[in-house]
Every structure is written in C-alpha cells, then in structure tokens.
Image (cartoon, grey):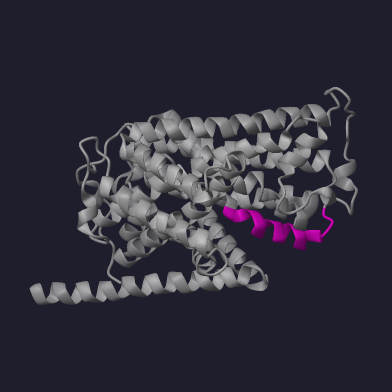
Amino acid sequence: MHDAPPVAEPLAGEREPLAGGLKQRHLTMLGLGGVIGAGLFVGSGAGIAVAGPGIIISYLLAGALAMLVMRMLGELSAAMPASGSFSVHAERALGRWAGFSVGWLYWFLLVVVLAVEATAAAQIAHGWAPAVPQWGWVLIFMIVFTAANLAAVKNFGEFEFWFAALKVGAIVLFLGLGLLAVLGLLPDTKAVGMSNLTGQGGFLPHGWSGVVSGVLAVVFAFGGLEVLTIAAAESDDPARAVGRAVRSAVWRILFFYIGSMLVIVTLLPWSSLKPGQSPYVAVLDHLGVPAAGQIMNVVVFVALLSALNANLYGSSRMVFSLAERGEAPRALLKVSRGGVPWRAVLASVAFGFASVVLNLEWPDSIFRYLLNAVGSVLLFVWGLIAASQLRLRPRIEREMPDRLALRMWGFPYLTWAALVAMGGVLVLMLTDDEARPQLMWSAAATGAVVLVALLREVRLRRTSRHTG
C-alpha cells in the first residue's frame, strides 16, 4: 500500500459543503443518545444472567475500552474534523483501501441495524394501535425520519436532543428512585444492604469466567458513540465541539450504565432476572411503580426511534464522505440549498428500507445472515481507529501541534492496550458457541470488502501509470 499523504495536505482544503447548525448541546446529547438504547434497557438482562453482580465489573471493562477508543477518535476528530470521521482518518493514516473498507462496512452496519430498530419500534406501536399493521408503522417511521434528515441539520439535532433528553431523564429518575430504595427511604421499603450482592452465590457466582462472558454480552452496547464525531463536522466550531462532547458523553455514559447495574443487582437477586426481559421493569415492579411495563415500553420506543434517527444521519454522512473521496458514486454529492446531502440520505433510506423488508419477511434466514455479517464490524472499526491514531498522532505533533486540543491518555501505551483488549474480545468470540458464527460471518464480510478495496487500489495504480 502506498504511504498516506502528509497530514497538512488534507487539512489545507476547503470546508465541506455541508451546513453548520449543530450546537454543543446537540452534540453532547447525540453522544449520550447514540449509546443509551434498547441494548441497555432490555439487553442488559443477558449480561446479568451470565455474570451476576459481577456485571458491574463487565461494564467497567467494556466501558473502559469504549472510553479509550472514543478518546483516540476524539483526538483525531478535533484535529481533523470531517463528516467521514474515522473513515477519513484511516485513509490518511493507512491508505485508500482502509478508508474505503471501514467507511462502507460502517455504512452497511448502520443500514442493517436500522431495520432492527424500525421493526422493534413498529412492534411496540402495533401493540398500542393494532389497527395499523406493523409494516404501516415502519413506513410511517421511515417517512418521518427521512423528512427530518432532509430538512436542515439543526432540525435533526433538535429531534435527537429531545429524544436523548427523555432517555437521560428516565435513567436519572430510575437512579434516583433506586438509590432511595436501596437506602430504605421510599415508603414501605427497608435498606437492602449487601445481601443481594454477596448472596446467591456471591458477587461472582460464575467466577471470573462469568465476568468475561459478561464483557462479551455488553461490549457492543457501547457502539453508536462514533456518530458523535461524524456530526461534529456540521457544528459551528468542530474542533472545540467534538472535544467537549467526547469528554462529557463518555463519563456520563459510564455513570448511567454502571450506576444502573449497581442499582439493579443491589435491589434484586440477580437470579430472579431473566434474559430477554427488562431488568428496569423488574426493579420498577419491585418498587410498586404502577404500569411499570408500559412506562418502560415508552422509553424503549423512544430509544429505538432515537437510534433509527441517528443511524440514518450517520449512514448518509458516511456515504457522502465516501463519494467526496471517489469511493462511492459521485451522484451522491448533491447537496440541497440548506446544506443537506439529500441523495446520500435517500440512498441510505432505500437500503435501510430494503433491510426492513428482509427483516419483516425473512427474519430467521436472509436477514439473520445480514445481521451476523455486521455483528462484529464494530471491532474492525475500533481497531482501525486505534491504528490510525498510532500513525497520525506523531505527524500531528510534528506538523501542527496546535490542533491537539484533545489528547489521548498515555500515548502510545494505552492505544496498544486497547488493541490488545480488542484482540481479547475476538478470542472470546471464537471460544463462545453463540458468538462464533457471528464472528465468522462478520470476518467474511470484512474480508470481502477489504479485497474489493485492494483490487480497486491495484486498478487505480495501473490507471495512474498508464495516464502518467
């Protein structure tokens, strides 16, 4: 592969033709909202089942890895803001093949996951209003969020701000009620002490292997933070905005995740929580909150729509950035008067809607293979972020140190530690019977995209020799 161009060259160009309009509060809430989703409210039950109270350590370990990755990405995005974020950084650091591969794989990930979110939200809405068929709800959601993403970017920011605010408010209220219950300060409650943390087999009922399995169950729940750095390119002051948003979002997410788990396993015996059922509902039922299930249904519904909105935004900006660099059809570069890449939005919606149809018609065959193919792509994205940061950080320090507004801690040691941890997660997936097929399918998809990227690289080199 050819060497990447010097850092100064990509930075010298004009700003992308996308409209600014996202404010600091939008970015901060986008970072929070992108991660706080159904995976936390419902999926955390699977982690508790395998780790018991040790799920707290599992979340600490997984959260620490996500925090390191976001610190690296925040450093690069503050120094070199771009709508393609880590795809642009990978191209600058490692060559066109890397930018092409990670950009298209992340786009594919978002439009497939979008189908899961749209279908799950439609199932909840259909339960509330059975007269509207499930596919009708999906169509309504797609139309509404397509319109929101085709409007000015500040409208997207407002949508996401209020969605995220509701989720954050729900978690804060949950933590407040939970703390009062733990201390015995709510009516008809007594202080629970440490009995649920040390009983039922102890704090680590399945030993450290349970904690490790818990990491595998929860690590992918931290995916979604990356959209924050994509959106930063459309803020009024990208370099400052992304630094502030990364700092605040990561710490708050760790607080919300770990605080929630601590409340849940302190208030209830871990063995009473069932995978697939929301541990949040179980706690609210335990506290005697009326209609706890319906309240959580509303929160999960909002979380799903928020993620759908953010994924549609992130996928459109990623494919637009690929088109800017000649890695996607140039027709996708059309920008509206309001600075919105409308063709990129429509292309992402079209593929997203196709994924929804596959999910509705063939959830256990075609769509399951698609979902498996993108299930572990996040680790590939994180790995390339770390590799890009290792290569670009010395160049930025040498050529433009004033752009290092946000620095990675303990460079390069913690970057290497994060890469080793990602390798550890891959090994865990290989040894896990349930995770192994997903890893194999994702590895095949990643290999196919990288092969296409390398073949394009060879063809472009040959073409440049002939024309030169």
**Residue drawn 37% across the image and 58% down it:** 103
Q: In which quarter of the view is residue 175 placed?
A: top right
Asked whether residue 74 appears in the rendered view, the answer is no
Task: Answer with the quarter of the image where residue 157 lies.
Answer: top left
Image spot of residue 207 (x, y percent): 81, 60
Q: As rendered, which of 59 and 127 lies closer to the eye?
A: 127
For the N terminus, the quadrant is bottom left
What's the magenta region? 204-220
Is 114 placed above or below 4 here? above
Using the image as rendered, state which of residue 363 and residue 233 is in the foreground: 363
How many tags in the picture? 0
Residue 60 seen from this side = yes
Secondary structure that dominates the magenta span: helix
The residue under the point 9% across, 73% down is 467
Is residue 300 on the magenta stretch? Answer: no
Q: Residue at x 26, y 40 (%)?
A: 18
